[in-house]
Image: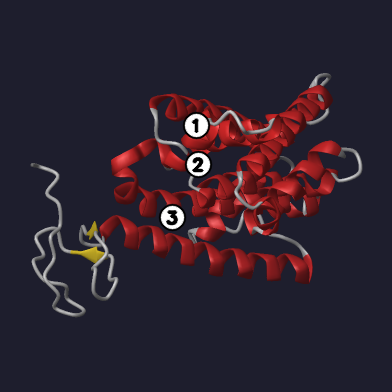
Amino acid sequence: MAAAEADLNSSNLTGLAKVRSTLRLLYHGHSSRSLRFQIAVLVVDLAIIAFFIATPVLRGGPSFVWLDLAVALLLAADMIARALAATDSLRWLRQPTTLVDVVILVTLALPDFLANFGFLRILRLWTLSRTGALWRPLKGSRRRFQETGQAVVNLVTFLFLVSGFIFTFFRREDSGIAGYVDALYFTVASVTTTGFGDITLPGTAGKLTSIIVMIVGISLFVRLAQSLFRPDKVFFPCPHCGLQRHDPDAVHCKACGNLLNIPDDGR
């Protein structure tokens, strides 16, 4: 970031280069100005995700199309800004998180033609977590909460993704799924392996979907439980072997025995 600041202060930069340097500082910098910008972007992103979750209920309303297009413009502007802020724009475009955002943008731009794929929009929450946008404002506490937060995000994303899929492709009278809440209720019951049996997905496709939901869902629950109840560790890369997780009071690395000098937050 120091190099970016030096470039920004240089009078030899072209207009586009100055814009890219400014955006790079805003999206990836650590100054108070950058932090305020990142928090503002995060708030807008979370509002967009709330809109995605509420889409099945809002769809068909008089202002839904305009909201959909407004969100598409916001997402497009954010992606263009991130592409300009990236050191290698082509490499950024090839990243899985970027490709997912492109798919989401297409479903927003063509809501009438791709209405059945609108449930994919909740993946925006996953891309935010994977790019670090959710955790960057945490600063020093980022490492401590990111692992648990990532497990929560993965589970929440899966629940709403599957709920949207079931609501889109299994909404029939014989399945008992008449609304989005029914789809969410079935998903949670399947993921927790409660299986009340009052709602079932019809046919072979329904059975296979239920099996996948139960297997993946319980795996995500186990991952979340591990991150919550695993003994507390500190993140400090061993300079000799690279092991990153150690006991808070560790003096030597358990992997190689190298002497550690873990900073004490209490000092």
Q: Which residue is mark 2?
A: 133
Q: CA distance from mark 2 to mark 1?
A: 8 Å
Element at label 2? loop
Q: CA distance from mark 3 to mark 1?
A: 22 Å
At x 79% / y 25%, what residue is drawn?
64
Q: CA distance from mark 2 to mark 3?
A: 15 Å
> Which residue type carries mark 1?
Gln
At x 62% / y 68%, what residue is drawn?
212
Q: Position of residue 81 (x, y in %)?
A: 66, 36
At x 68% / y 65%, what residue is drawn?
209
Q: Position of residue 120 (x, y in %)?
A: 71, 49
> Which residue type carries mark 2?
Ala
Element at label 3? helix
> Which residue type carries mark 3?
Ala
Residue 38: assigned label? 1
Mark before the other along the chain sequence, 3 or 1: 1
Is 88 rendered above or below residue 77?
below
Q: Can you say which quadrant of the picture contains the N terminus?
A: top left
